[in-house]
Image: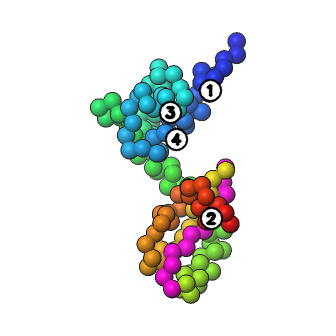
Amino acid sequence: MARSGAEGRGVLEGAFALMEVLAHDDEVGLTRLASDAALPKATAHRLLGQLVALGAVQSHEGRYRLGPRTFRLGQAWHPARALRAAAAQPLRELAAAGGGVSLSLSVPEAGHIIVVGGMRGEVDEVFPLRSGVVLPPGSAAELV
């Protein structure tokens, strides 16, 4: 029998939907997590229990946040490794010639613009230049 809507989602899709919500907030309660992830509350609770057991999510006093395992896995992702290596010297030269500006190297990935490298300058940062940061819609990187 086919299921529709949120109940028809796969287990991994539901778990990732919860983690996406947690990626945008410090700590979130079960009711809001389930709502924002478009999951039934019982399903969200079950998936969160599994994610907590795996260390991907932490739970404290009925609130949830991303856990250390998620951080470790995220740190292991190195987007566009060859592009970053090829761009390192030109970025250094451009930063030196630009009088202390901050630069970032970004690529389109899954409908988003993701920073894959950067050089911090003397000018205050508008966006963090860490690899993996998703730039907001309408940023200069998206327009280019």
The residue that mark 2 highlights is 141
Residue type pointed to by label 3? Asp
**What is the C-alpha distance between the residues marked 3 and 2?**
28 Å
Marks 2, 1: nearer the viewer: 2
Q: Which is more N-terminal, label 3 or label 1?
A: 1
Name the residue at 55% across, 29% down: 38
Disc sitting over residue 20 in the figure: 4
Q: Which is more N-terminal, label 2 or label 4?
A: 4
**What is the C-alpha distance between the residues marked 3 and 4?**
9 Å
**What is the C-alpha distance between the residues marked 1 and 3?**
14 Å
Q: Which is more N-terminal, label 2 or label 3?
A: 3
Q: Position of residue 72 (x, y in %)?
A: 46, 50
Stretch of the chain drawn in magenta: 99-110
Residue type pointed to by label 1? Arg
Dot 4 alpha-carbon crowd within 10 angstroms: few under 14, some 14 to 19, many 20 or more: some
Residue type pointed to by label 4? Glu
Q: Is residue 38 magenta?
A: no
Q: Which is more N-terminal, label 4 or label 3?
A: 4
